[in-house]
Structures are given as structure tokens and as C-alpha cells.
Amino acid sequence: MKSIRQQVNEWIDEEELPSRPGLKVLRSSASHFDPCEGMDEDDREAYWEFISWFISREHLALLSLPVPVAVGFTPIEPNDAISFPFGSMDFERKSSFKAYSWRLKMIFDRVKDLAETHSCISQEQGKRNIFRRYQELVEREFRDKALQLLETYTKYPQWTDKDKVFKRIQEYNAHIGKCKAIWRDFAYRP
């Protein structure tokens, strides 16, 4: 009985407990705090100007840096324009990320995954399905585009640049060859 009494005395009183986190202070619109209450228009303006100056002191070091003046450069859009920063030509030129290279890498990784899956499957029907998916991927990404370029050139040779078209077809054929090499290396592993 004595230990129970001692334990009860050690408990925290309910008044000493912190309030629950879900509780919120109710504020009515009448009790809204207005720091400029009772001030005339000039005093209000001076008050908010002071608050703005005080908050801008945080960025004083950044604002004190000189802005270089570009000679012979005409910006495409004004400095105050709202635009997406990653869509600018400066970002494209200075960025090491190339979307086309990344896309090719993802396609080659997908071919490798399909080839490794093909080598792991023991059922003939499953192997045929994986091989069909590999063929559809290569046709969709490279072969169809190469055939479309060749067809466009044969229909309208006067409107296309022969060297550019055949260079592009050659690139697609090189990608097809790389896919075949990846398939050959990974699909028939024991």
C-alpha cells in the first residue's frame, strides 16, 4: 500500500501536463492583432517601411554584390520575367545532362534487363515472349524511325538533306547494332 501511495504521489498533476498538440487557440476576427491600430496613414506607411528595411537587412550581403554588365549580349527576355530556369539556353549549354543520351542509356539498360530475364527463364513460351518484347522495343525506338526517315527521303528527296538523313539513319542502325550486341552478350548466358 505504501508503494502505491508513493507511485501516485510521483505522478504529474493534470494541470502540469502540456496541452494536446491538436488543440488550437481560437481567435475571433474582433481580437485580431493590428500593429498599426490607432495610427494615421503616414505612420502606417513608416511602420511598414521600417519592417521592410529591417527584414531586407538579412539579404544585405547578397544585395551588395556588384552585378556584372554583359557587353554585346542582348537578353532574350527581361530580368524581371518569370520563366522556368532549366529551360534556358544557358542551362542547356552549361549543363552536363543530355536528355537524348540519358534516353539511349535507359533503352540499352532495358534491353539488358530483357536479355538477362531471357537467360533466366526456362520455359520456351516465356523466352519467346521476352524476345518479342525486345524486338518491339528495338523496332519502336530505332527501326521504325529509320524506316520513316528513308521513306520521307524517297518520297521527297528535294526537300530533305541527303547527308543529314543518311547520317541519322546510320545512327539508328548503330543503336540497333548495339542492342543486338547487348542481347547477344546477356541473353544466352548459362
Image (cartoon, helix red, strand yellow):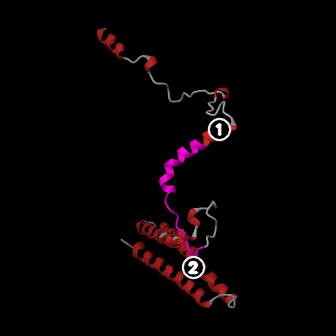
Q: Is residue 77 above or below residue 152?
A: above
Quarter residue 166 falls in: bottom right
Identify the residue at image location x=44%, y=70%. 112
Identify the residue at image location x=54%, y=81%. 172
Q: What residue type is disc 1 on?
A: Arg
Q: In the visual, does 109 lie left or right of 143?
A: left
Q: Which mark is residue 143?
A: 2
Which residues are drawn in magenta?
Answer: 49-73
Q: Which mark is residue 65?
A: none
* Spot occupied by residue 171 in the image (x, y as percentages of width and height): 52, 82
Spatial separation of the CA atoms under disc 1 and disc 2: 71 Å
* Spot occupied by residue 93 in the image (x, y as percentages of width and height): 52, 73
Q: Residue furthest left?
A: 2
| Magenta segment main secondary structure | helix
Q: Secondary structure at mark 2?
A: helix
Dot in front, 1 or 2 = 1
| Residue nearer the viewer, 67 or 17 | 67
Q: Is residue 50 magenta?
A: yes
Identify the residue at image location x=55%, y=86%. 167
- From the image, tell me which residue sits under label 1: 44
Q: In the visual, does 37 lie left or right of 124?
A: right
